[in-house]
Image (cartoon, rainbow, N blue to C red):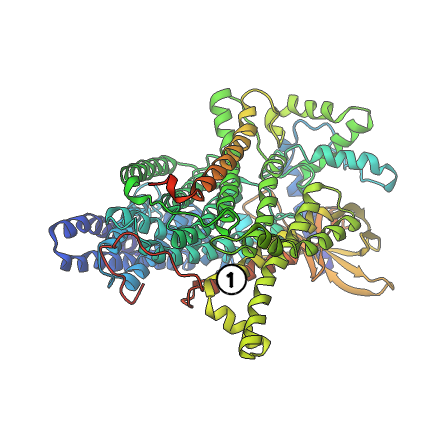
């Protein structure tokens, strides 16, 4: 039973590795990602913050931080290595944008056309509040003002 | 053989619904109401015919008839029976067939329940439903035909998408979603029926359609929660909501339907917001079609976009037809629909409902804009952009937190008007609960303003809603000497709509508490363990026992057995996070192990493993209060069921109907 189980492990893992490499482009490190220790918890917190704003390229809208996929783990290791090497979070993000395009950012930058995305909802809420205030005023006005 | 039968059934059903839809106005114009029996017959015939097609598909799936195109696409001899049956909704064609079947079911129910009602409202509503059914029938005999012959017949198929055959919740979430989504066609049909029959200025149509909307809303609420649960149990990242376009698509009509359920009360009592409420019905329906289009056309890359094809253009055309038709109808009749009501005063429940509708609409538009923006950016700038979690959290959270607060203010204020002094007396006491919960959150370590406000407002709204029960029970206890349980039952039975609403509020608050707590106090760690090594996260310790592998007919399973170690070192349980490797896909499907208690979940996911079995990398997440989300979903459904009841209306008299309705609702309304 145990022999069979281990055989399964080996076969499956082999098949997995064979099917994988194409998806790993843009990542230098193919090695096992370094695992955090308690010592560098500040670096870890920064890695989490940056990885939460970057998209996992093979997932459905999950961030590098959240995704359990192999590629995301490798990219997270790249984020960690770059931060450890002294790059700022913005520089790390810029690196990924240069590799993957703007698409890799989970939140669009507040520039150009993107500004609309941020302003339309805000304008709608402000306009809606003004409208509600106006309607309540009109609908509670004394009878004489309405025919 | 069976495919020919099913295909012909669908062709005949298309003819039947088209015939019924065209016959309705002829019947009414010529005054030959006896012909309505033919229209209603067409509805029943359609249901029967689509049922034949749906049952044929299930039979073809179960018997592995790979000469049927859909079976060749999603079937596999090695897939377990349950997942073979539910792959009926696993891909595009099957889900359209299932949609058509649910629509047929709803249409038949509408006819069965309301056909005796006098007037033209029901016939025109049925006509609208038949027109919608015609659209889906066209899809089924055209671009989404699931019964195309396949030659040569393959010996086996690939099986359903791996994500869909990994968890039994896929047998629960999609049917609930369709019951919710498709059910929203009924209020839409009544809204159009009301305009066609010139009854839009009376409250009759909304009294009829409210119950259908509430039914669908209950199904949709349950479906969204089941979808979150599925995502939590299958995707392996310990989350339940990623603002994925598909999730957004289910959330958008929920928001407008919720707005409708509130505004319709203002309409009935104050004779106001008529046009707005009608538009919410239309918007909800359009958002369900838009959601199906977004998820099924493959236009946005997303979990559910398994297919691409010409079908997107059919959906776009249908959405355009619906929008243009209803806009013309509503604009052309707005003078007659609108009525001039008055508010009793600014400090009233009505005002809160206006704000509630504003914020629900604001959340809906924010999510809609965010979901569609990548398409706009690609078209205008030629650049692909992502709009994800950080955007939606930043933009939608303020309005959602405001809604939590309003959920406490609304129930506390009376209908009509009150003095500001009385309003203060009603609004201050729940502030105690707000302060307590807010303080607990700060002491527990919450630092984000939204999180602290969310906790405080959950406390505020919870106390405000529970207080309504308390006040009513105390009054009955004092006046009639009823025991407390009797008082509760009679109180709720005496006004099911009102108290059903409060129960649903409590369900939403439980969900809000679960979401806020689990996202604020989540702790996670990832580590590579050799057998015997332990990992401790937030006071929970797990120890890797061993790695194992298992062959199943449709997949290979790799699992890690982990012992959960208690405070004194004793083993208090085992967890088995797994990775499932399906034959059809290179990507393994993670299957995390979850250990739930009332205070939260211990969530363990197997991230990687050494093929020799020497070590395993696991991620351990401690998420407080997650089970409260699922429980809150159940409470919402209970609230919806209570609210469906016919129990007496509240003490306040309904607003008098201003227009003499051309017909009188018969006993069935």
Query: Of B147 and B454, which appears nearest the observer?
Result: B454
Q: Quadrant of residue B290?
A: top left
At numbered mark 1, what does the secondary structure look like: helix, strand or loop?
Answer: helix
Horizontally, is B554 left or right of B562 in the view?
left
Given residues B349 and B178, the one toward you in this image is B349
Residue B66 seen from this side: no
The subunit letter for the residue under badge 1 reads B
Q: Position of residue B328 (x, y in %)?
A: 29, 36
> Which residue in the protein does label 1 denote?
B639
The image shows residue B604, relative to residue B643, as above or below, that is above
- Residue A25 vs residue B446: left or right? left
Q: Could you classify mark 1 by the number of other residues whose Cα lies within 10 Å: few (under 14), some (14-19), or many (20 or more)? A: many
Judge by depth and name the residue closer to the eye, B552 or B359: B359
Query: Left or right: where does residue B444 sit relative to residue B230?
Result: right
Where is residue A15? Give x, y as percent. Answer: 64, 42
Total tally of numbered discs in the picture: 1
The percent position of residue B409, horizontal first and vertical second, equals 58, 52
Residue visible at 51% across and 39% down in the picture: B362
Residue furthest to the front in view is: A144
Quarter of the rendering occupied by the N terminus of chain A: bottom right
Above or below B314: residue B637:
below
């Amino acid at each position: 039973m145990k022999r069979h189980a281990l055989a399964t492990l080996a076969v499956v893992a082999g098949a997995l590795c064979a099917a994988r490499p194409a998806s790993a482009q843009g990542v230098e490190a193919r090695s096992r990602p370094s695992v955090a220790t308690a010592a560098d918890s500040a670096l870890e917190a920064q890695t989490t913050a940056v990885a939460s704003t970057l998209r996992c390229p093979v997932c459905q809208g999950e961030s590098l931080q959240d995704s359990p996929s192999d590629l995301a783990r490798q990219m997270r290791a790249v984020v960690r290595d770059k931060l450890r090497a002294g790059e700022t979070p913005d520089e790390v993000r810029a690196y990924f944008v240069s590799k993957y395009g703007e698409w890799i950012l989970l939140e669009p930058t507040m520039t150009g056309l993107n500004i609309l995305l941020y302003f339309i909802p805000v304008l709608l809420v402000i306009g809606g509040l003004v409208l509600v205030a106006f309607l309540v005023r009109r609908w509670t006005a004394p009878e004489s003002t309405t025919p | 053989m069976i495919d020919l039968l099913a295909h012909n059934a669908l062709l005949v059903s298309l003819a039947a619904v088209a015939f019924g839809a065209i016959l309705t106005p002829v019947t009414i114009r010529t005054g030959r109401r006896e012909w309505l029996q033919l229209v209603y017959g067409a509805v029943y015939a359609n249901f029967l015919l689509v049922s034949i097609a749906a049952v044929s598909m299930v039979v073809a799936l179960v018997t592995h008839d790979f000469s049927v195109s859909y079976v060749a696409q999603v079937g596999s001899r090695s897939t377990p029976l349950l997942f073979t049956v539910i792959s009926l909704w696993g891909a595009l064609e099957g889900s359209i067939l299932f949609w058509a079947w649910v629509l047929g079911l709803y249409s038949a129910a509408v006819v069965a329940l309301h056909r005796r009602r006098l007037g033209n409202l029901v016939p025109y509503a049925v006509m609208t439903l038949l027109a919608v059914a015609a659209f889906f029938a066209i899809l089924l005999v055209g671009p989404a035909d699931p019964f195309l012959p396949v030659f040569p017949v393959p010996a086996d198929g690939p099986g359903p998408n791996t994500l869909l055959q990994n968890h039994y919740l896929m047998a629960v979430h999609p049917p609930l979603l369709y019951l919710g989504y498709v059910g929203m066609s009924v209020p839409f049909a009544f809204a159009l029926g009301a305009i066609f029959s010139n009854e839009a200025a009376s409250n009759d149509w909304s009294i009829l359609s409210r119950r259908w909307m509430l039914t669908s809303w209950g199904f949709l609420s349950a479906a969204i929660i089941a979808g979150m649960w599925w995502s939590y149990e299958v995707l392996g990242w310990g989350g339940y909501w990623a603002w994925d376009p598909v999730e957004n698509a289910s959330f958008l009509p929920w928001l407008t339907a919720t707005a409708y359920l509130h505004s319709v009360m203002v309409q009935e009592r104050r004779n106001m917001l008529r046009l707005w409420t009608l538009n919410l019905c239309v918007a909800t329906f359009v958002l369900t079609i838009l959601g199906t289009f977004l998820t099924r056309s493959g236009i946005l890359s997303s979990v559910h976009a398994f297919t691409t094809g010409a079908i997107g253009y059919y959906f776009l055309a249908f959405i355009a037809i619906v929008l243009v038709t209803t806009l013309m109808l509503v604009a052309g009749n707005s003078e007659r629909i609108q009525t001039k009501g008055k508010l009793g005063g600014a400090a009233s429940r009505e005002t809160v409902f206006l704000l509630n509708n504003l914020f629900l609409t604001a959340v809906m538009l924010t999510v809609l804009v965010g979901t569609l923006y990548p398409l706009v950016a690609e078209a205008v700038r030629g650049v692909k952009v992502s709009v994800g979690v950080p955007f939606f959290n930043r933009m939608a959270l303020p309005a959602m937190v405001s809604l939590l607060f309003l959920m406490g203010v609304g129930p506390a204020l009376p209908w009509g008007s009150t003095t500001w002094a009385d309003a203060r007396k009603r609004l201050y006491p729940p502030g105690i609960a707000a302060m307590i919960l807010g303080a607990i959150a700060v002491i527990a370590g919450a630092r984000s303003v939204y999180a602290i406000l969310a906790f405080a407002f959950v406390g505020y709204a919870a106390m405000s809603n529970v207080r309504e029960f308390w006040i009513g029970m105390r009054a009955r206890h004092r006046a009639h000497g009823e025991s407390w349980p009797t008082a509760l039952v009679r109180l709720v039975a005496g006004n099911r709509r009102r108290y059903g609403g409060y129960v649903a509020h409590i369900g939403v608050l439980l969900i809000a508490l679960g979401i806020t707590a689990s996202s604020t106090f989540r702790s996670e760690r990832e580590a590579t363990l050799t057998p015997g090594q332990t990992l401790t996260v937030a006071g929970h310790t797990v120890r890797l026992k061993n790695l194992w592998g298992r062959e199943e007919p449709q997949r290979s399973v790799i699992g890690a057995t982990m012992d959960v170690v208690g405070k004194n070192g004793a083993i208090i349980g085992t967890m088995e996070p797994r990775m499932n490797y399906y034959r059809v896909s290179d990507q393994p499907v993670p299957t995390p192990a979850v250990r739930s208690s009332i205070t939260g979940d211990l969530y363990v996911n197997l991230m990687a493993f050494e093929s020799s079995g020497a070590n395993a990398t696991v991620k351990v997440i401690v998420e407080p209060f997650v089970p409260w989300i699922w429980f809150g979903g159940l409470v919402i459904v209970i609230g919806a069921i209570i609210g469906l009841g016919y129990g007496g209306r509240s003490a306040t008299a309904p607003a008098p109907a201003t227009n003499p309705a051309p017909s009188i609702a018969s006993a069935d309304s």
